Amino acid sequence: MSSNAITVPAVQIQDRPWVDKLHQWVTTTDHKRLGILYIASALLFLVLGGVEALIIRVQLMHAHNDLVSPQVFNRMFTMHGTTMIFFVAMPILFGFANYLVPLMIGARDMAFPRLNAFSFWLSFFGALLLYFSFLGGSGLYGAGNAPDIGWWAYAPLAARAFSPGHSSDYWTLAVLASGFGSIGTAINIIATIVSMRCPGMTLGRMPLLAWLNLVMAGMVLLAISPLSAAQIMLLVDRYLGGHFFDTQAGGSAVLWMHFFWIFGHPEVYVLIIPCFAFMSEIIPVFSRKPIFGYPVMVGATVAIAFVSMSVWAHHMFTVGMSSYANSFFTITTMAVGVPTGIKIFNWIGTMWGGRIQLRTPMLFSIGFLFQFLIAGLTGIMMASSPFDWQLSLSYFVVAHFHYVIVGGILFALFGAFYYWYPKMTGRMLSESLGKWHFWLFFIGFHLTFDVMHIPGILGMPRRIYTYEPSRGWDTLNLIITIGAFIQAIAILVFVANLVISYFKGATAGNDPWDAWTLEWSTSSPPPAYNFASIPVVASRRPLWDLKHPEDPDSRYE
Amino acid sequence: MRRVTSSTLRIVSQVIFLLWAATAVWAGELGNSPLHTTNIFAPSSTPAKSIVELSVFVLVITGIIFVVVFALLAYSVVKFRARAGDAGREPAQVYGSTQIELAWTIIPILIVVVLFLATARVIHTIQDAPQPPTAIEVTAVGHQYWWEFRYPNLGIVTANELHIPVSDPAHPTPTFFKLLSADTDHSFWVPELAGKTDLIPNHPNRMWVDPHKTGVFLGQCAQYCGAQHAKMLLRVSVDSAKDFEAWVQSQQQPAIQDERAAVGRRVFDGNACMNCHTVAGTPANGRFGPDLTHLMSRGTIAAGAAENTHNNLRLWIQDPSAIKPGSLMPAMKLNDADLDAVVSYMETLR
């Protein structure tokens, strides 16, 4: 631990003209700046995807509403899903991984800084391509339009016969480009963690955040590759006369489903594992205890990654697989619940006997635990395939996966924002705005997504732009829409907090949370080279050892 | 914080209770009318019933897990939160425990085994059920955005409103479906009769129902199939054995030739109508749109998007997008006289 007490002034760029500053951001290969670029672009698309969600919600507020046409509605849910998965969730998590992994393993940058920049810009241009479709989607066919094939782009809906014009091509190319970006970043994360750990940091002493991002990056390589292959096959179908998915020429619609979901399900874990990583850093610090069962947490993560590669067809229980296939995917899906449960128990074990400080990052973490528990249990319901024959493709599923993505991933991300914002900017986020943000979002979330399970049980399918008044889904949909707007207000509070605190927040100092991992040993924000001298560690909590020389972790590990 | 937690709990439990109450009232109001609801927990057929039995079991197990884990979480948040007095002191640093880890690994594994066995039994019961010789066979074909129903053994073709006999458990007459698609993916979902099964091009599927009650059961396409996925509605009329027999008799007749509607028939046959629609016993034999031979025996048009009334029929022929924007039926651009004549002709097709 040699970097202690070395403070290095941040690089002075204040007096340069703005063009120079912009040029520095665009050409940067610094992992911290690229991390912030990833996060900032994801926040931009979060707002766009959120507006699309609000349009969907207003349209469904009551039966036979005619705010938008069915065609526009179909574009909205396609764009909402594609945006949120590919251009919000993945980039924002890559952004945090980029920013934090080198700092937490005591490195000065990622292994391949230029590949890092290339990957970011590739996925950013993918996002721009997707949104350009609003203008150029129909090409020569007339006015622009966005893709309307759903974010799974099921065959044969994505074939030329059913999707003329270029809107589906923009979708394909956007996903393909961002996929290559993701593969580049995954290779980078793996190389960084494998080869750039500081002296003393064995794999067994790595912070869980680094471990979990390593697993996540491995899953990206396995999951994105078949997706990219499928996109290329789709392009071959559309432009070179291929018949992979062209059912009118004997192609297979089910083949596309397999390709898509063998990406699609591991993708859920690609998104949630980095959030497990945030929890595994935040919960110990605010409980003032080390993570309970570190080796078990690593093992459970690897087990989740392994098992989750063999569960994809639980998205296809209704497509008419054999009873043996349905049984197989039932048991593999339920089996994922075991290591996931172990993780939840270990986080509770970490809190047990601690001194829990209910600061904003911890509030979001507790929200995560509560909601992720429920999301996991509704997941078990749908793993039971006959139950899924009723629930699948209904609003129950929509409620379930938003419970995972909003109640789980987004809550964990908000926790991460409040926890690491001081490191990234040198300023604390406002605690009182943070509490407003938390409670508004918590109430809005539960109003929307708790209630959303019920129309599914009452037979409301997803992806319908309107419904019959006689079905009795009106009141429930109105409540869901009100909840969505409360969430939107909470997001505004959050953005206001990010902006106001950047200028007026309290100065953070190096280590505002009295934490234990290496990123807190350097200045906030860290200098371009992170550490003046490379740190040396002797345990999983190097700063604990430093603060408690009488009782260091290194004595027990 | 203790006060906030308990009031949050109370609010959550009240909300859950209210929602359950609302669901129950909603289900109760419509439960006794001949028009059935789309509630998955109000089953009227063996597949749907076995699913409900399994789901109640799964709900109980997951409910118990929720209560236990939530109690542990809530207890640790309340009990172990930092207090004013302990500033600066760190709690005992505990790194883990092999026994505890083993306990919370093995117990979930046992739960998974139990849930899996219960599930596998129901999968087998529903999916591998043999087809009895008394079964009615129906071929359902999904189209953008309507349903074609063919009864190969009875020589009947109809659309959107399926008729099947009620099945007496002592003498079961279940209906077995062959599910096909003419274009994109669709999904056949009538929640009170069975779970959904997709209709996929080049991938024939099979499902069955044996309704125990008569009445009209509602459903709709559950797999996104294009612009008008939302208005691809579905009605299943479960008839008594006698009513079903009568319905079959009437559907097997060719179209009524009513001389008073000869003008309308000429307009129908002289325009593009006959390229897409069939009227049995006439030259019109198109298969792209619904069979119209017995159009007036159906309660709705446009796959359930509108009631089958004179005005709706007229509006539909004149401008389908007024009822169902994105529908593949073109606006026929007929003059008023021709339009009225065609509507009169349609109204003779009983």
Image: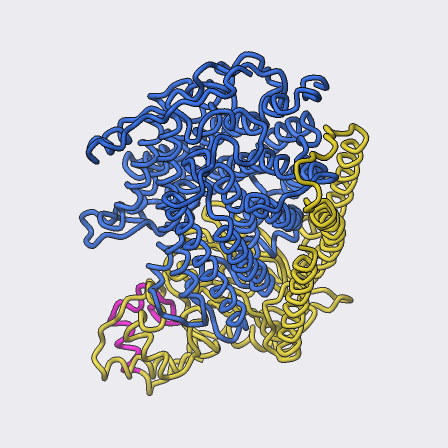
Chain colours: A blue, B yellow
Look at 45% across and 19% down and name the residue there. A531
> Which quadrant, please, contains the C terminus of chain B?
bottom left
> In the orientation shown, which residue stands out farthest toward the bottom?
B260
> In screen coordinates, is A309 left or right of A22?
right
> In screen coordinates, is B274 left or right of A284?
left
**Image-quadrant location for residue A205:** top right
Look at 60% across and 18% down and name the residue there. A203
Magenta residues span: B262-284
Residue A267 image point, x, y percent: 50, 37
Residue B154 image point, x, y percent: 55, 65
> Which quadrant, please, contains the N terminus of chain B?
bottom right
Can residue A269 be found in the magenta stretch? no
- Judge whether B156 appears above or below B337 on screen: above
Look at 36% across and 21% down and name the residue there. A113
Of residues A470 and B84, the one nearer the viewer is: B84
- Judge whether A338 appears above or below B66 on screen: above
Of residues A88 and B71, the one nearer the viewer is: B71
> In the orientation shown, which residue stands out farthest toward the top?
A199
How many numbered markers are drawn?
A: 0
Instruction: Kindly tell me whether residue A252 is visible in this rendering.
Output: no
- Judge whether A285 appears above or below B76 on screen: above
Instruction: Kindly tell me whether residue A185 is visible in this rendering.
Output: yes
Of residues B33 and B124, the one nearer the viewer is: B33
> In screen coordinates, is B192 left or right of A218?
right
Residue A508 image point, x, y percent: 47, 37
Residue A303 image point, x, y percent: 64, 29
**Image-quadrant location for residue A542:** top right
